[in-house]
Amino acid sequence: MIHFIPPSEPHDFECKVRRRGGTWFSGGSAGRAPDYWNDCKSDLAAGFRNLCAYSAMLDLVGTVDHFHSQSTHPHLVYEWSNYRYASAWINSSKKSAEELDPFQVQDGWFEIILPSLQLVLTTTVSSEQRQLAEYTLNRSAPSRQ
């Protein structure tokens, strides 16, 4: 993982996503929330430079991840601040797991060991964040699943 700066909310997000989502919620909200967030997926991708928020790998067909899951935080379903750009396989495997927030990751917390390309934590990760960082690292690594 690398540090990401939260991208600015698109100027049309209120109209395209938040307001439509609010209308859906006020109408009884039966079933899965409509994916209005995809109307701003290209803005999110641009804000993350097309890099997956969790793997930091280029992904030109990524998905909108709800950092706080829809099932546990339904009030954040249509909130820009809850979105992270993520590879589809990471997003679908994450479910409602609490991950280390890419906006909180600091430079130097992770390093890549060559030539194996193994991603590891460094000693610079704060003790408050270390357990969550270890969990995120272990869960997100495809070779460890």
Image (tube, helix red, strand yellow):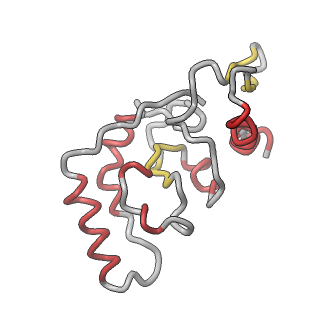
Vertical order, 111 against 69 (above or below): above
Q: Nearer the viewer, residue 39 or 72?
A: 72
Vertical order, 57 against 111 (above or below): below
Q: Give the x, y percent position of residue 9.
A: 28, 44
Q: Nearer the viewer, residue 2 or 37?
A: 2
* Quarter occupied by the N terminus: top right
Q: Give the x, y percent position of residue 124.
A: 69, 20
Vertical order, 23 against 90 (above or below): below
Horizontal side of 65 relative to 98 (left or right) equals left
Q: Which residue appears at 72% of the width and 26% of the height?
A: 119
| Residue at the farthest top position | 114
| Residue at the farthest front position | 128
Q: Which residue appears at 73% of the width and 21% of the height?
A: 122
Q: Which residue appears at 38% of the width and 64% of the height?
A: 35
Q: Which residue appears at 70% of the width and 42% of the height?
A: 132
Q: Give the x, y percent position of residue 55.
A: 60, 34
Horizontal side of 71 relative to 39 (left or right) equals right
Quadrant of the rendered image containing residue 18: bottom left
Vertical order, 49 against 19 (above or below): above
Counting labels gives 0
Q: Nearer the viewer, residue 103 or 64?
A: 103
Q: Give the x, y percent position of residue 44.
A: 36, 42
Q: Nearer the viewer, residue 11 or 93?
A: 11
